[in-house]
Amino acid sequence: MSITYRRTFPLMVTIIAGIIPLLSYFIKNPTLLAGTNVITGLASRLMNYAFILSTAILIISQAKIMIKRGMAQESIYNAIFLVTITATAGSGIFLGQASAAYTWIINHIYIPPGQAMMVTMLLFWVSGYYRVFRIKNVETVFTTIAFIIVVLNISPIGQVISPSLPLLRDWMTTNLYANIKRAIVIGAAIGAVILSIRVLLGMERGFLRME
Amino acid sequence: MLQRIPTLVILIVLASVTLYLLDKAKKGMEFPLRRLPTLDRMEEAVGRCAEMDKPLIFETGQYSTVTKVKETPPTLAGLSLMDWIASIAAKRGVKIWSPQSNPAVSILADEILERTYMEAGRPDLYDAGEDLPFLPSGNLWLVRMMTFIKHNKPAALMQMGTTTGICGAWCEEANANGAITFCGTARASSSHHIIFWDHWLIGEEALAAAAYVSHDPTMLATVAATDIIKCLILGLLIVGYLLQMAGISIVPFLG
């Protein structure tokens, strides 16, 4: 039972759930199409159940941490979390997503800190770019030169320095960036197909923890 | 229907090359592959965590999922790599935290960590739920990751799966806290974000990494198949380029 449960059953589900949509893509057959719809519908429902389960685990774990910490100062964060998730979920479930309470929570509590966080993230990006563009080797020389050309091009001063800067930027975008990106896409697409073949053949099993 | 014939032909060629090399591998043919330096650094990073007595954070990215066409392969590849890292970490007594933004991936990651630590006889290093936070993707996850890294001060941060721009923020946070950072992504749209990270796997490297580390000849055969197919596509590109120069377009035949 254990081996069937752990190895054979997940592999059978993976193979069936992979083969039927693949066949229905190439063969127009009502049975295959119905099978594909059942599989995608089932996957969607399973995701919803997983979401509920994970949220329940999250709430229970936060409550456990709060009880363990007792009256410690850090408990306030767990308490705030539990109150906000209960209030948001409660207002959404019982009053509806169009209710004034739910809308107020989203507009006045959820969105403003989120936007503030996105702005703060830019500071981390600047810090990251500063670290990245320190010239340490040949690669970073090229990266920094490309960065300077692009930044100068989008700055007013760039037009003053040289009118040919936009041409250089355009050449970099259309010839270097686009082609490199295409090369990555082709490589990743081949890799994804081969990985899918490995999954369908039951070779890629690390994510099922079978070894 | 006819428009899908070129796709079917390409798929048959891909599958044929892969199956042929798999057959060869089963008959004893070896496929020597260049070792990816990032994988060696990842192994060393686990040792660093053990020496510093600090945890390791392994996550699969903001958009990791198992139900979307583009994001599923990198997510599964990331989880397979996590399985490898977890087995090394369990032997060396290193604790892994795996915060996830997707509930299904969170459950898979939880399963991998639980079984790995149990099999290694180190259940003390695994705390179900309590240390494996799940939070929905978005700003909430960004805040949680930042605080998580700040409080736990990991010696290594590994993100193998779907890298995005916001991941650069907690990479920077981890770097500020002295962690060595690793990134693996097959998402071309966000591939430039890897520059924030110390070591990376990009494109098909990220997808093939689990096969590299498995040392299984049949898995290595599939990596070799990827290289052969790349050569075939390169040949097709050159032929297409020459035909285009001669005034013959092959685009209509590709669907």
Image: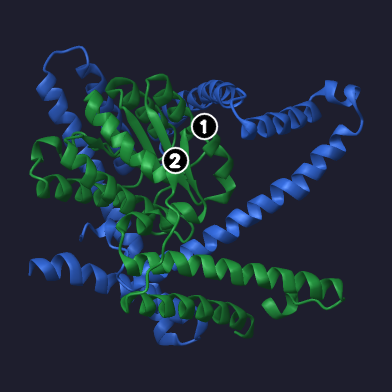
One can see residue A197 in this view: yes
Q: Which chain is blue?
A: A
Residue at mark 1: B196
SS state under label 1: helix
Image coordinates of residue B106 in percent, x first then y, are 28, 46
Which part of the image, by quadrant, shows the C terminus of chain A?
bottom left
Mark 2 residue element: strand
Which residue occupies 23% across, 44% down?
B88
Q: Residues within 10 Å of mark 2 (few under 14, many from 20)?
A: many
Which residue is labeled 2 in the image?
B183
- Work out whether residue B112 or residue B53 is closer to the camera in this orientation and state it: B53
Label 1: few (<14), some or many (≥20) within 10 Å?
many
Horizontal arrangement in the rendering, residue B154 relative to residue A103 (left or right) = left
Q: Give the amino acid type for the residue marked by disc 2 in the picture.
A: Cys
Residue B255 seen in this snapshot: no
Q: Which chain is green?
A: B
Q: Nearer the viewer, residue A114 or B211?
A: B211
Write the residue at 40% across / 54% down.
B209
Asked whether, in this view, residue B121 is left or right of residue A97, the answer is left
Looking at the rendered structure, the kind of residue marked 1 is Phe
Q: Label 1 marks which chain's residue? A: B
- Relative to B211, say whether B112 is above or below: above
Label whose residue precedes the other's in the sequence (2 or 1): 2
Q: Are marks 2 and 1 in contact (CB under 8 Å)?
A: yes
